[in-house]
Amino acid sequence: MALPKLKDLSHGLFAGVTAAAMIAAAPMAANAQQAQPIAVSQINVPMSDARNIDERMVRVGAAQETDRAINIALFGVEREAWPRLRGAIQQGVANGCPVRAVFMGPTNAEPALEIFAKGGLMTNPINPNTVDPRVLTNLMCDISQEQFPRQLAARGPAPSSPN
């Protein structure tokens, strides 16, 4: 009786494993297509209605309690721009860039979107009525990652080598 060559045996084994993996992967792929990510519209960001407060006081409030997350102050926002801004902010939060609060300042003020972190203003004023939502989301995340870097917890001393 002749033994099969190693090449023939490994090819048959590989083909069987590949076929089994493809069969097992089919239901997982179907489930992955059915699984939907959390809708950005379901992400709630705390709002502070500061439309009747002086701009300077809104800025003072927005700079407070920013030691762990950013605050966003909005001034002069047109009604039509708000859904786009809200979506961009929610997308930033969904991307892992926390926002402590959004301060809606006076709508009759000069249009400005300002991001605060660590007690200070991190941006030059941006026109909230014309800013591209992707630019806002990226800017939020850039500031969050720069000001609040995520550090791995210490796992104790490194194991000593046996030498």
Image (cartoon, rainbow, N blue to C red):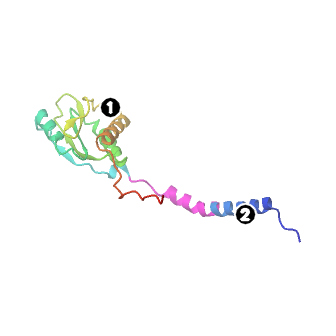
Q: Residue at x 43, y 58 (%)?
A: 160
On screen, residue 24 above or below 75: below
* Residue 37 appears left or right of 148: right
Q: Of callouts 1 and 2, which one flags the residue occurring earlier in the amino acid sequence?
A: 2
Query: Is residue 6 positioned above or below 52 on the image?
Result: below
Left or right of 84? Residue 53 is left
Q: Amino acid at mark 2?
A: Leu
Q: Nearer the viewer, mark 1 or mark 2?
A: 2
**Residue at image x 25%, y 45%?**
69
Residue 6, quarter of picture = bottom right
The numbered disc on residue 131 is 1
Tell which of 120 and 140 is nearer to you.
120
Query: Disc 2 on helix, strand or loop?
Result: helix
The secondary structure that most of the magenta stretch takes on is helix
Circle 2 sits on which residue?
13
Q: Find out whether residue 35 is within the magenta segment.
A: yes
Residue at the (80%, 60%) spot, across then down: 8
Image x and y of residue 90, in percent: 32, 46
Amino acid type for the residue under numbered disc 1: Val
Circle 1 crowding by C-alpha within 10 Å: few under 14, some 14–19, many from 20: some
Direction front: furthest residue: 163
Position of residue 66 measured from the top left corner of the image (x, y, whole percent): 21, 44
Range of magenta residues: 22-38
